[in-house]
Image (cartoon, rainbow, N blue to C red):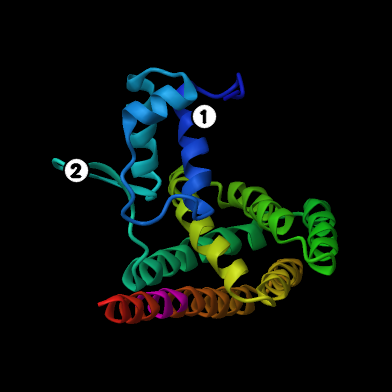
Amino acid sequence: MSFKANDSLSEQIAQHLGRQIIRGEMLAGDRIQELRIAAELEVSRGSVRESLLILQRRHLIDILPRRGAVVKDMSESHVRSLYEVMQVLLGLVVRKAIKVMQEDDLDRFIELIHLLQQQVDERDTGAFFEHSFLFFELLYPYARNTFVEDILDNLQPAIQRAYYMALHIEQDEMKECLTFFKAIIETIFRRDIRSALEIIREFAEHQSSLVQESIVRARQIEAAWGRRKK
């Protein structure tokens, strides 16, 4: 396994494991075995242990007594709480961005939206997923608040996990997301705080409901399959 030299080893391990969790390659409740990961990546067990603390801070795993590290459950309440917090924080960022962003600053966002539009047209869900979060990474610094940025950085992997699910649940969700990005930029350009906050609320509630419904359906299918096997 090769890593980027500019990140600490534990950070690189955390990103590697985080990608597997976000993409559903590791499922809720799966145990994360330190020795196996250390052997696979040819790193020390201490580095793996440090990476698990990073993943815990990023809300992707739980570290439990006598069980060790397990992938965090994606319950309806977890998803609902996650989007509620994200709605508040993103609203704060956009409120500040409307006050401080200059017209020239919008060029990077417009260029990114053109790229996202191309990926929607090509139905390239993987690329759309990756570039969606460039939008947020461009936006967060306009909060001018290091506490908010730090919280958002730690929440982002959990949001990515839910967002990844949403994009793969509903075929037209990429279009919904693109419409959201366009609307946010338009409201920032118009300095329309009220509309921006309403757009954020509607999108957060929409995607939260979509993911929660998928979790409920998956549980119902699992229960029905279990009864059939008996």
Q: Can the viewer see residue 149?
A: no
Q: Which mark is residue 67?
A: 2
Residue that extends furthest to the left in the rendered view of this protein: 66
User: In the shown orientation, is residue 21 left or right of residue 137?
Assistant: left
Quarter holding the N terminus is top right
Give the x, y percent position of residue 78: 34, 66
Q: Mark 1 or 2 closer to N-term?
A: 1
| Residue plotted at (76% across, 67% down) | 189
Q: Label 1 amino acid?
A: Gln
User: Around disc 2, counting alpha carbons within 10 Å, would you say few (fewer than 14), some (14 to 19), or many (20 or more)?
Assistant: few
| Residue plotted at (36% across, 81% down) | 220
Viewer-closest of 42 and 89: 42
Specify the quadrant of the image occupied by residue 43.
Answer: top left
Give the x, y percent position of residue 164: 57, 61
Q: Can the viewer see residue 169?
A: yes
Q: Nearer the viewer, mark 1 or mark 2?
A: 2
Q: Provide the residue span drawn in magenta.
A: 214-219
Which residue matches tag 1? Answer: 12
Report the Cα–Cα distance between label 1 and label 2: 24 Å
Give the x, y percent position of residue 131: 71, 53
Q: Would residue 222 be counted in the magenta stretch?
A: no
Vertical placement of residue 210 versus 89, above or below: below
Specify the quadrant of the image occupied by residue 56.
Answer: top left
